[in-house]
Image (spheres, rainbow, N blue to C red):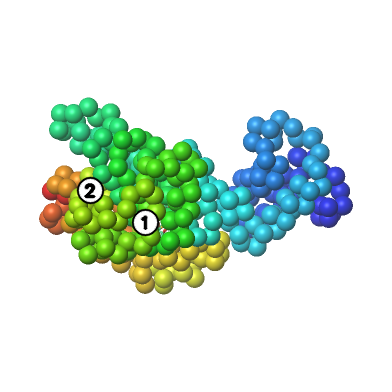
């Protein structure tokens, strides 16, 4: 392939060369990746890309485009190169400090909203939810995608988001502000739900957002209507089977739940039982093989109304239950 810097390139040719380069390197979704990188360097949208195939790219754009293509070809995720990923119709900033939001995680939001609406119906209330009187926590918030999607859908809900990683919390906080939800979510550094226990509340470091730790500790353990989480669920023993863009570029604390992968559910589920109101909901994302290990934990009291929801690939992806 001729040196990109030495030639003038139109949009169509640049795209073709980009796809070719990525295909040769066996990059998955090569066409989409080349498109996204070209859109990123030209700061245009897809409509422009296909409406102006003859347009010549300036030398700086050509150089940046081929530099990003080479980085993608050697394993960097496209989202780290463009700095963003869409989730629930919103553009999230992503960095190597957070998991790149995955499309299947949107099922978690759907299940949570559906089950909250059913709860309203059962109580004879309007199932059109605003979130009034609802207190929600997203455990392991990462980029903030779940908490922020819920803030969008439930404008009156009180929402907390925790993560064990302070670096992830900073990104989540930035996303909340940039996407128009600056004071809607309280971000807490916490190991699972420990920030909400009597003891844990005294050790919240740091508290981001608008609420202070003294608010939490003085009111005792918080009791939630919804606890939602996409915890790390890959087994360390599977690390060598992961694609390099995942294993070498996404945070280990966001990927691995233990040697087997499902260990964190065993800690989170009993904690959730202590922090949900009667009738409160627990909604968990599952890994590809997590169901047999996790379902039994929710088949005993105080849990009831257990549901498994498959994703579009028919993988059991969401496990949800009610605290009886
Ligand atoms: C799979 S990622 C999910 C991120 C985001 N919620 C999403 O769906 O894209 C798991 C997140 O849990 C956090 N995490 C890992 N262990 C944790 C723990 N013990 N307590 C709280 N958060 C934890 C990681 O830092 C990571 O951000």
Determine contact: label 2, label 1, CB under 8 Å: no
Residue 207's label in the rendered image is: 1
Q: Residue at x 28, y 32 (%)?
A: 129
Q: Residue at x 77, y 52 (%)?
A: 63
Label 2 environment density (alpha carbons within 10 Å; few <14, some 14–19, many ≥20) = many
Label 1 environment density (alpha carbons within 10 Å; few <14, some 14–19, many ≥20) = some
Query: Which element carries disc 2, helix, strand or loop?
Result: strand
Q: Residue at x 20, y 37 (%)?
A: 119
Q: Quadrant of ligand 1?
A: bottom left
Q: CA distance from mark 2 to mark 1?
A: 19 Å
- Whether residue 98 sits left or right of residue 186 in the image: it is right
Q: Note whether residue 322 is visible.
A: no
Q: Residue at x 48, y 49 (%)?
A: 174
Image coordinates of residue 48 in percent, x first then y, are 68, 32
Residue marked by disc 2:
224
Query: Which element carries disc 1, helix, strand or loop?
Result: loop
Image coordinates of residue 257 in percent, x first then y, are 36, 66
Mark 1 within 8 Å of ligand 1, using the beta carbon: no
- Whether residue 38 sits left or right of residue 307 in the image: it is right
Tell which of 292 and 234 is nearer to you: 234
Q: Note whether residue 202 is visible.
A: yes
């Amino acid at each position: 392939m001729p040196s990109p810097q030495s030639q003038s390139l139109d949009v169509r040719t640049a795209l073709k060369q980009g796809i070719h380069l990525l295909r040769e390197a066996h990059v998955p979704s090569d066409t989409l990746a080349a498109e996204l990188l070209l859109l990123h360097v030209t700061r245009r949208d897809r409509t422009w890309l296909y409406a102006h195939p003859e347009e010549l790219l300036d030398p700086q754009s050509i150089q940046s485009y081929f530099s990003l293509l080479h980085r993608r070809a050697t394993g960097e995720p496209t989202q780290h190169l463009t700095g963003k990923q869409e989730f629930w119709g919103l553009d999230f900033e992503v960095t190597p400090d957070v998991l790149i939001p995955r499309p299947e995680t949107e099922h978690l939001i759907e299940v949570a909203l559906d089950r909250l609406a059913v709860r309203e119906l059962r109580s004879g209330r309007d199932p059109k939810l605003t979130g009034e009187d609802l207190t929600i926590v997203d455990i392991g918030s990462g980029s903030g995608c779940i908490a922020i999607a819920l803030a969008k859908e439930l404008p009156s809900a009180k929402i907390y988001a925790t993560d064990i990683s302070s670096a992830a919390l900073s990104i989540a906080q930035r996303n909340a502000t940039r996407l128009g939800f600056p004071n809607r979510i309280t971000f807490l550094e916490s190991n699972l739900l420990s920030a909400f226990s009597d003891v844990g509340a005294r050790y919240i470091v740091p508290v981001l957002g608008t609420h202070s730790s003294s608010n939490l500790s003085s009111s005792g353990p918080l009791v939630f209507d919804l606890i939602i989480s996409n915890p790390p669920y890959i087994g360390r023993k599977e690390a060598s089977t992961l694609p390099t863009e995942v294993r070498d570029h996404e945070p280990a604390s966001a990927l691995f739940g233990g040697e087997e992968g499902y260990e964190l559910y065993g800690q989170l589920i009993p904690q959730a039982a202590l922090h949900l109101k009667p009738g409160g909901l627990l909604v968990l994302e599952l890994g590809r093989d997590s169901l047999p290990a996790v379902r039994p934990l929710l088949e005993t009291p105080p849990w009831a109304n257990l549901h498994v929801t498959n994703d579009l690939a028919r993988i059991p992806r969401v496990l949800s239950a009610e605290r009886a």
